[in-house]
Image (tube, grey):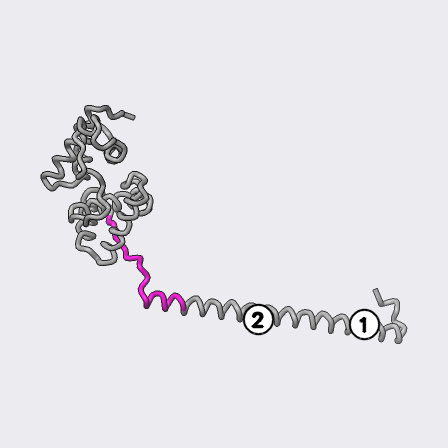
Amino acid sequence: MKKFNELTTKELITSVNLAKDSGNSLVKAFFEFSKKHGYSQGSVRNHYYKVVKNTEKGGDLYRKLGLSDRLKPAFIKEFTRAEEKDLLYQIAKGIINGKSVRKTVYELSNNSDKLALRYQNKFRNLVKNNSPLLEEVSSIIELETGIKVTFKNREKTEKYLQLESEINKMLERIIKDISDENRRLKLDATKLEKENAQLRCVVKKTMQEKQFEKFIK
């Protein structure tokens, strides 16, 4: 795999700074950089977050690369609309590539638990509130790939939970009734076996009394 050097890393940081200045998304910056230099978009994104996370603040390399505090992933500030759209876009791409939402947000966060949790919570809120961005991103993905992605609200409503509870209770009753019926059938079978054994004894005794022993096996 093609490796990053200091020159390409500095260019990447510059591209991100320019994207922030112009209000463009990081996804767009990563895509354009990957296309220009022949990297995969995921590799560009992961390298960027790794550099931002691991480069010592205030050091020579920090200044040489053009890093600044504004490039650090923020966990407190609100998402911008562009960031929300980027998040939905990346998750949608992950879904059509067979990944779960959880796996996708971990990749986006470069395996940072704190950032992944922030991404996941934001995604859930966007879906729960039926954000207009859902349909917008879905349309973009469909134009690019021909695949329709539907973001579903998986939150269980009170009505859903009540219905689920009633179904569970009904299943429990059915299972109990089946178990009771099986026990009754077993008792009846045991009773019949005893009656058959007693009947065989009576028949055998009668045959002996009538001197039919030669027919007795």
Image quarter in which the N terminus is found: top left
In this rendering, the answer to whether 62 lies above or below 170 is above
Give the residue at x 85% y 75%. 206
The residue that label 2 is drawn on is 180
Residues in magenta, as a range: 148-165
Categorize mark 1 by other alpha carbons within 10 Å: few (<14), some (14-19), many (20+): few
Q: Quadrant of residue 126?
A: bottom left
The three-letter amino acid code for the residue at tag 1 is Cys
Q: Is residue 202 magenta?
A: no
In this rendering, the answer to whether 100 lies above or below 201 is above
Which of the numbered marks, if any, corresponds to residue 201? 1
Residue 123 on image: x %, y %: 25, 51
The three-letter amino acid code for the residue at tag 2 is Asp
Q: Nearer the viewer, mark 2 or mark 1?
A: 2
Categorize mark 2 by other alpha carbons within 10 Å: few (<14), some (14-19), many (20+): few
Residue 68 on image: x %, y %: 17, 35
| Residue most extreme to the left | 22
Image quarter in which the C terminus is found: bottom right
Q: Nearer the viewer, residue 182 or 193?
A: 182
Give the residue at x 65% y 71%. 187
Give the residue at x 32% y 67%. 158
Q: Is residue 151 magenta?
A: yes
Between the residue at mark 2 and the residue at mark 1, the CA separation in whole angstroms equals 32 Å
